[in-house]
Image (cartoon, coloured by chain):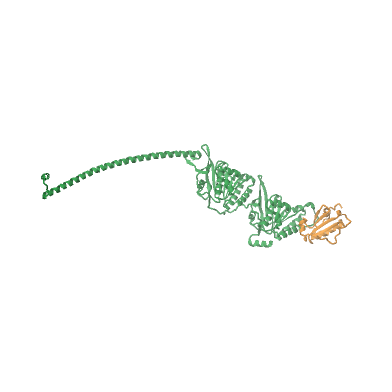
Chain colours: A green, B orange
């Protein structure tokens, strides 16, 4: 069966050696698909670094996820102890054993019980292993920790020869095996030099304590015939088993979005070309203490949740309840979003884990919660658990990861000195897409907040300083007054505003006076026009009177003449008394 | 379990406590196994004449027993009684060690 499997894998992956997935989060990414199929691999490390757990998870995942039964040969812990130890991780070894998916064989060796009386071999072990493999059709085998043989048996020459034979035999069997080994002193990876025999794949686990904070790390020392990650990768053991962080994508080939995300502060959006941040971008808000960084962060989170999207808030300074209460005072109801499941707080002291562990924890949580936005408040505190360069390296990886997932991230950072430096302490300002700076403006006996955008990649943004005010109703940005006296904020700005208002009133007053005068002038003129009009009318009448009189005279004369003519022609119709007429005619 | 023919039988006149019950686990007819069988037989005849019981078990025939008996190295001789139980591995060529292992050094 195993052989068929190998063939299948070989045909599917042409150039690479066939690999078996371990099922351990992240490990398969680093190894480029798992550990070599049908060959033994060595997992070594100091006591308590997670060798047994890693190998056991390999077996359990194989049995549960890949339908590959496994044999776990324990040289250290009894089956019962193992079952109890990993029960907290949700691995039910008893059930797997019942289902014939797993076989745990505890090998007990006690030197005091054994006397060596000459030549011997380890056939007993071979027989047991062979029986175990055949009884469940195992494809995976773990020997944990085979070095214990060296403690029980003294004849090194025999042991070494037998181990060599054992690994050869395992290869022939076609099972994928993990051998664990205790880290030796000096340069050797294992105490008994197991790496001599198992040379295809060697994974080194490490557990380091720096500044009282422990970090687990994993490194692939060697992987014959395969490309693999060579870095030290942090890993974490928690309730879901082991997670290794396959850090950085070294290439910068992430997808980008031109979609915008509102910052939750309309005035800020306006400064950012009117629409806010880019989706999947990274935003840094830095400033001195008490400048309202958390308020900006919370405002952003609130806005994301208002849009019915999920937001994950990592708080390194305040507890969730404290943040919710504080934000309530500026009329932001975060509780509602928490109850709706849109907002999740993850509050922890930075000193809880090492940096890498933080990163792993964040990774896990982000993968689980799948938020559209992440807030880290503040990143400054991480310095307490690592050096600047380490924090930067960690944040690079986080930003990389978030960009890949198209998650918008907002960091806040505390700048310790009031002098604005061109770099934040974490040195991340060059990594982020947008950088908002909130700074104190001390003037006129008061402290006000000024905000400006140091940079915002790929969008038109305002170059102005805005005054950043926090009121009962929320956050707002106001234009500061730039005058001959410099930048005016706070009450000085208010005074200036008042001053301007007074001026305005005075001006309007003056204007209305002028208006009235114009009106009056108009009236005077109109009166004048009226009198002139009447004058003109009377003159016109005078002229007309002459015309009429003349007309009358003309007509009367005409009539008289006609009368005269009639009289001259006949006088037949003349009445008796003509004295008057005669008299006239004579004249 | 196969009792080897010609093996010295249990004698009634010897007390139970003095009887050495031995079990030898071997793997077929490998050189180590055959050597161990002949060595232990010789040893028993020399030092434990008439007060031992030897059982020879071929683990190849009974694979389950390997896990039950916590067998790793073979050949292995187990002294079942008298107590304490002891385990001896190897081809039993080192007589001194076999004696010590069987707590016979005083004899």
Numbered marks: total: 0
**How far across and how far down the image is residue A549, in percent?**
20, 44
In this picture, residue B10 sits left or right of residue A423: right
Camera sees residue A224 = no
- The image quarter containing residue A516 is top left
Residue sitting farthest toward the front: A576
In this picture, residue A536 sits left or right of residue A427: left
Residue sitting farthest toward the top: A445
Above or below for A215 versus B41: above
- The image quarter containing residue B10 is bottom right
Quarter of the image with the C terminus of chain A in it: top left
Quarter of the image with the N terminus of chain A in it: bottom right
**How far across and how far down the image is residue B95, in percent?**
83, 55
**How far across and how far down the image is residue A405, in percent?**
58, 53
**Could you say which is closer to the camera, residue A407 or residue A557?**
A557
**How far across and how far down the image is residue A228, in percent?**
64, 55
Residue sitting farthest toward the right: B13
Above or below for A292 versus A227: above
In this picture, residue A472 sits left or right of residue A520: right
Camera sees residue A394 = yes
């Amino acid at each position: 069966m195993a052989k068929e499997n190998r063939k299948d894998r070989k045909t599917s992956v042409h150039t690479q050696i066939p690999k078996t997935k371990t099922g351990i989060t992240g490990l398969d990414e680093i190894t480029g698909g798992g550990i070599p199929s049908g060959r033994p691999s060595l997992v070594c490390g100091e006591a308590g670094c997670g060798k047994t757990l890693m190998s056991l998870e390999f077996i359990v995942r194989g049995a549960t996820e890949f339908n590959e039964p496994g044999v776990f040969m324990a040289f250290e812990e009894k089956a019962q102890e193992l079952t109890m130890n990993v029960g907290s991780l949700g691995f039910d070894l008893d059930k797997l054993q019942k289902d014939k998916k797993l076989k745990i064989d505890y090998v007990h060796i006690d030197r005091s019980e054994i006397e060596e009386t000459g030549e011997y071999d380890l056939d007993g072990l071979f027989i047991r292993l062979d029986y175990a493999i055949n009884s469940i059709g195992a494809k995976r085998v773990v020997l944990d920790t085979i070095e214990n043989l060296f403690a029980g048996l003294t004849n090194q020459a025999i042991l070494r020869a037998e181990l060599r034979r054992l690994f050869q035999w395992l290869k022939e069997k076609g099972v994928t095996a993990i051998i664990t080994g205790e880290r030796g002193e000096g340069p050797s990876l294992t105490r008994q030099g197991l790496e001599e025999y198992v040379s295809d794949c060697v994974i080194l686990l490490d557990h380091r304590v720096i500044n009282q904070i422990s970090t687990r790390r994993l490194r692939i020392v060697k992987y014959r015939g395969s490309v693999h990650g060579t870095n030290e990768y942090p890993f974490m053991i928690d309730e879901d088993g082991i997670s290794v962080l396959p850090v950085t994508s070294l290439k910068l080939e992430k997808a980008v979005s031109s979609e915008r995300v509102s910052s939750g502060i309309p005035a800020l959006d306006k400064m950012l070309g009117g629409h806010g941040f880019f989706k999947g971008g990274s935003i840094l808000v830095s400033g001195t203490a008490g400048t309202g960084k958390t308020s900006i962060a919370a405002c952003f989170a609130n806005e994301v949740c208002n849009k019915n999207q999920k937001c994950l808030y990592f708080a390194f300074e305040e507890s969730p309840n404290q943040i919710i209460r504080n934000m309530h005072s500026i009329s932001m109801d975060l509780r509602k979003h928490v109850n709706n499941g849109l907002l999740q707080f993850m509050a922890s002291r930075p000193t809880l884990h090492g940096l890498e562990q933080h990163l792993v924890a964040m990774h896990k949580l982000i993968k689980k919660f799948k938020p559209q936005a992440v807030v880290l408040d503040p990143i400054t505190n991480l310095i307490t658990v690592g050096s600047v360069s380490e924090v930067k390296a960690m944040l690079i990886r986080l930003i990389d990861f978030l960009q890949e997932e198209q998650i918008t991230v907002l960091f806040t950072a505390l700048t310790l000195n009031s002098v604005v430096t061109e770099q934040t302490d974490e040195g991340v300002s060059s990594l982020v897409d947008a950088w908002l700076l909130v700074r104190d403006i001390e003037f006129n006996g008061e402290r006000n907040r000024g905000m400006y955008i140091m940079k915002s990649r790929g969008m038109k943004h305002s170059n102005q300083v805005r005054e950043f005010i926090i009121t009962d109703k929320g956050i707002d940005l106001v234009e500061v007054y730039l005058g001959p006296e410099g930048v005016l904020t706070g009450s000085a700005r208010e005074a200036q505003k008042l001053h301007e208002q007074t001026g305005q009133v005075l001006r309007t007053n003056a204007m209305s006076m002028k208006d009235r005068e114009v009106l009056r002038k108009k009236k005077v003129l109109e009166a004048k026009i009226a009198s002139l009009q009447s004058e003109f009318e009377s003159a016109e009448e005078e002229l007309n009177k002459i015309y009429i009189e003349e007309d009358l005279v003309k007509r009367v004369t005409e009539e008289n003449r006609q009368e005269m003519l009639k009289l001259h022609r006949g006088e037949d119709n003349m009445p008796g008394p003509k004295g008057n007429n005669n008299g006239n005619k004579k004249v | 379990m196969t009792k080897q023919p010609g093996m010295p039988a249990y004698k009634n006149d010897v007390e139970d406590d003095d009887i050495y019950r031995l079990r030898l686990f071997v793997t077929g007819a490998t050189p180590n196994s055959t050597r161990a069988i002949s060595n232990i037989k010789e040893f028993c005849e020399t030092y434990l004449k008439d007060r031992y019981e030897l059982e020879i078990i071929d683990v190849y025939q009974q694979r389950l027993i390997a896990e039950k008996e916590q067998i790793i190295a073979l050949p292995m001789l187990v002294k079942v009684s008298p107590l304490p139980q002891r385990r001896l591995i190897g081809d039993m060529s080192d007589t001194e060690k076999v004696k010590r292992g069987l707590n016979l050094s005083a004899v």
